[in-house]
Image (cartoon, rainbow, N blue to C red):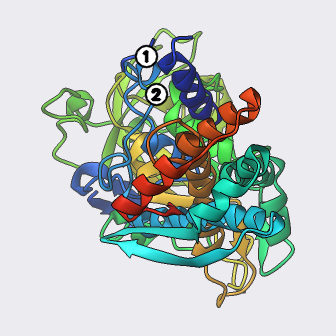
Amino acid sequence: MVVASWKLLMGIFELFGLSWIGEAENISSNIINKRSFEISSNIRSKRSFEDHVQHDVNDENNQVFIPVIPGITLPISHFWYYLLALLICGIIHEAGHALAAANERLNIKSTGIFLYILYPGAFVEFDLNELKELAPLRQLRIICAGVWHNAVLFLLGTLILSSGILSTFMGCTTWRLVDGFGVSVVSVERDTALSAYLKPSMLITKLDDFDLSGSSLDSWNDYLLQNEKLDLDSIGFCASRRGATSLDCCDISADHPYGNAKDNATSCFKRIDENSAHKQELKCLPTIPILVNIDAQRCLRDIDCPPESSMCVLPYTPKGYPKPLRIFYKDSPWVQENNDQEKLVLYLGELVDVWEIVQVSILQPRWSWVPTWVPLSIELILRYTISFSLALGVLNILPAFKLDGHYALIALLLWVSGVDYDLDEVVSTSKRTGRGRLGK
């Protein structure tokens, strides 16, 4: 958000010559397969807002203004947050004009809010004949007050988000802060296999062997979105040679991204013992006893395993193909039976799909009647308000016809020059167009 704001400001400077920068099916009760999933771009984790308004990496450095298009750069599910944030920014902007006018003893003819098709806004109407009679500096205070209030709103909102005040405050109410312990499930996309296992308010504590400790939300995002960049220890699983079958499950290609085995209960594994003559040897082994066993014995070498499970293996998938993900979770706080017992579900598919399907937060409801969506909704509204407030302020201060910058530039030039002035031309133009008011 800060980067986008900086690009926006730099773009404004360049505009004025400082040049424009151009622009699953179920295999078993605990195994979930991505094969039957429909991918939706409408559900994200906390970074949803920023990621949805970013353009392709190849274009992001060349784009200053990013269009907000519902369903394309803006998730459809965020549409009402978007409208509410626009209304908040417009009201704060116009409240700035109104307060400054009252302070300068300028009569306000009318104020209000409006809805133009689906665009919400607000307005404050002055008598421009009275406005022109004020000294240029007093005019500037009134004209620039809207932009000033937008700037204050932007800075205040940024402070609240970046300091963690919002999450800390809400963590003292009907939600509890779980940052450092895991992430709380807010929602799971309906009609997906994961929705049968992960429920709202459950606590996800670990992905594979990656603990969601420290900054839980960042850990969640990093593991699912930047897994290949993380320095992760590869700890194997002890497996029995007796369960090995043909190598059809290791026939992984574009036509068979999950292997070519007829038996969906097997997966491809590779041996990892550095001292073994069978290092990197591939095996098709039963999935459930190895990966869907929360008490599975772990290893680095074959000799770490008991005689009955004499191989040390890891799941094998070539780079760029779906991989298994072990998701560890706990029940909601109000579930009395086995509340603190960790459970495990295995997901087979792209890691980014889990990030798209499961929406998470660092705030978990304390009781069953507390809604899970409230903290995230408040944060989304705040994030949109911050961005729109900056955009509204920057665009309104441009010296373009009928914007605040148009009137501010005239008043500024007259104030600097010290010449007597007359805004009759501006006033008459406003009257002819029916725009004798400031409105956003």
Q: Residue at x 76, y 67 (%)?
A: 99
The amino acid type of the residue labelled 1 equals Trp
Q: Secondary structure at mark 2?
A: loop
Does 75 sit left or right of 337 as displayed? left
* Mark 2 or 1, closer to the camera: 1
Inspect this view and state whether residue 291 appears. Answer: no
Q: Residue at x 38, y 47 (%)?
A: 68
Q: Relative to 206, is 165 above or below?
A: below
Q: Relative to 280, is 242 above or below?
A: below
Does 305 sit left or right of 347 as displayed? right
Q: Nearer the viewer, residue 18 or 331?
A: 18
Residue pointed to by mark 2: 64
Q: Nearer the viewer, residue 419 or 321?
A: 419
Q: Residue at x 53, y 26 (%)?
A: 12
Checking the image for residue 121, the label placed there is: none
| Whole-percent x, y for residue 204 in the image | 63, 59
Residue pointed to by mark 1: 20
| Whole-percent x, y for residue 132 in the image | 64, 54
Q: Relative to 44, is 369 above or below?
A: below
Q: Mark 1 and mark 2 in contact (Cβ < 8 Å)?
A: yes
Does 141 sit left or right of 352 as displayed? right
Does 124 sit left or right of 279 as displayed? right
Q: Residue at x 54, y 30 (%)?
A: 8
Q: Nearer the viewer, residue 380 or 254?
A: 380
| Whole-percent x, y for residue 193 in the image | 34, 64
Inspect this view and state whether residue 276 appears. Answer: yes
Whole-Å distance between the Cαs marked 2 and 1? 9 Å
Q: Secondary structure at mark 1?
A: loop
Q: Earlier in the sequence, mark 2 or mark 1?
A: 1
Which quadrant, please, contains the N terminus? top right
How packed mark 1 is, by other alpha carbons closer than 10 Å (few <14, some 14-19, many 20 or more), is some
The amino acid type of the residue labelled 2 equals Val
